[in-house]
Amino acid sequence: MEESIVARIKALTKEDNRLPCVTAHQIAASLGVDPLQVGKAADQLGVRIWACQMGLFGYGQKPLPEYRLVRPAESVPDDLAVDLRGAVVNGKLPCAAAWAIADRYGLSYLEVANAIEALGLKVKPCQLGCF
């Protein structure tokens, strides 16, 4: 495990031993490493990644309705639907592909997650290796 990744994870992990997804990605970007390396290091350290930027982990207390952030979009523009379906690999939409599509359309990751939900697609693999 790379010492610089470990040091950053330890420095930025919350007191409850959780590291937000956005922070894990910031660590990867600042060190010029693949996010998966950060995710694997966090896992080896027993640090839990949380607060998925696409809202896929949920937030708050289960089973309260507000726990689940992702809600099926009421409508999905045809071009977005074509791009999302076209990015599916082995029956799943990679998280990195979903992010790239969100960036291309100027949408938030949560907005794209809502479109993905409406289309009945599943996101996998996570860039951090969480799923």
Image: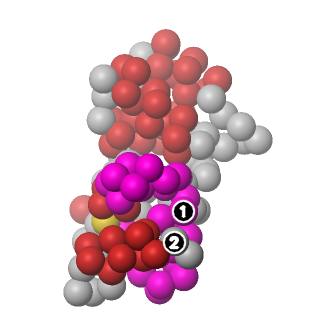
Q: Amino acid at mark 1?
A: Gln
Residue at the (47%, 19%) spot, across then down: 80
Identify whether 114 is placed above or below 35.
above
Q: Which residues are magenta?
A: 25-50
Q: Residues within 10 Å of mark 1 (few under 14, many from 20)?
A: some
Disc assigned to residue 85: none
Numbered disc in front, either 2 or 1 = 2
Q: Which residue is mark 1?
A: 37
- Can you give x and y, in whole percent of width and height, for residue 68 in the image? 34, 60
Identify whether 6 is placed above or below 16.
above
Left/right placement of residue 98 relative to residue 67 reads right
- Can you give x and y, in whole percent of width and height, for residue 2 in the image? 51, 71
Q: Judging from the image, what secondary structure is the residue with disc 1 in?
A: helix
Q: Is residue 79 among what the camera can see?
A: yes
Q: Residues within 10 Å of mark 2 (few under 14, many from 20)?
A: few
Predominant SS of the magenta segment: helix
The quadrant in which residue 14 appears is bottom left
Check if mark 2's residue and mark 1's residue have beta carbons within 8 Å: yes
Q: Which residue is mark 2?
A: 2
Residue at the (46%, 31%) spot, across then down: 100
